[in-house]
Image (spheres, helix red, strand yellow):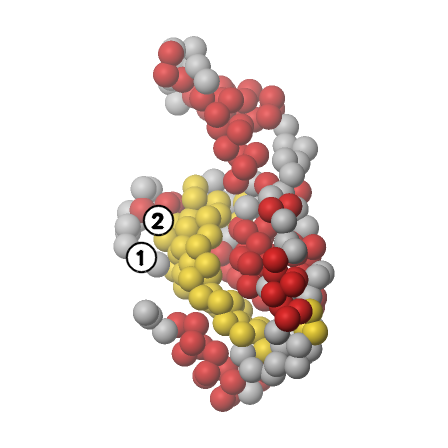
Amino acid sequence: MDTKVDEMSRIPEEEEPKPGPIDHARIERAVREILIAVGEDPDREGLRDTPKRVARMYAEVFAGMYDDPERYVQTFFSEQYDELIVLRDIPFYSFCEHHLLPFEGKAHVAYLPNGRVVGLSKLARVVDAFARRPQVQERLTMQIADLLTKSLQAKGVAVVMEAKHACMTCRGVKKPNSVMITSAVRGICRSDARTRAEVMSLLHNQH
Ligand code: ZN
């Protein structure tokens, strides 16, 4: 396990995605237009800096557009551990691409390694990098599972995500407590009934 400790302690706080080429000026113009379109006066005091603030917010919440999630799992360490590795309750924030409203919740990630193991923080980084884009929860869940399957050559991967969507709570059907649950299961976690049952009970278990 020495390798694990070394690898983890050597990670600096390097990994915040750098601000990408998000066009702040263009967002500011668009937000000003929206304010006018809904009948507001974009020059009144409370709204004067809103386009700027919204542009900065989008640059932050969509930073995943210019981040490559694969970079977080390129550094793995070799470990002959062939039991499930599970990370539950990874908080995530994303934006639904249909309404540009946030959805947020928890991701649960499990994989059955094939000699390649990554630090747990890396799994959270992968979730973040995919979440910080205009998304739908179904695709987000699959992208995480597919990346881990490919990059770690894991024998099996399972990802379960549960989230509340603002577009369900503040508009449309207004169902504030509904939680959407999606899952993506790959490899032996999908094909082997016993492994699948084990991983699903670990990921769905309420603590
Ligand atoms: Zn939506």
State yes or no: Cβ of the residue under disc 2 lies below 8 Å from any atom of ligand 1: yes
Specify the quadrant that holds the C terminus: bottom left
Please name the residue shown 69% across and 55% down the image. 71
- Rendered image quadrant of residue 22: top right
9 vs 180, nearest the viewer: 9
- Mark 2 is surrounded, within 10 Å at the Cα level, by few (under 14), some (14 to 19) or many (20 or more) other residues, namely some
Specify the quadrant that holds the N terminus: bottom right
Whether the residues at callouts 2 and 1 have beta carbons within 8 Å, the answer is: yes
Can you identify the residue that label 2 sits on? 168
> Is disc 2 placed on a helix, strand or loop?
helix
175 vs 23, nearest the viewer: 23
Residue 154: percent from the left, percent from the top? 65, 75
Rounded to the nearest whole Å, what is the CA distance between mark 2 and mark 1?
Answer: 8 Å
User: Which numbered marker is on residue 178?
Assistant: 1
**Up/down of 14 relative to 160, above or below:** above
80 vs 148, nearest the viewer: 80
199 vs 171, nearest the viewer: 199
Identity of the amino acid at label 2? Answer: Met
**Up/down of 193 relative to 144, above or below:** below
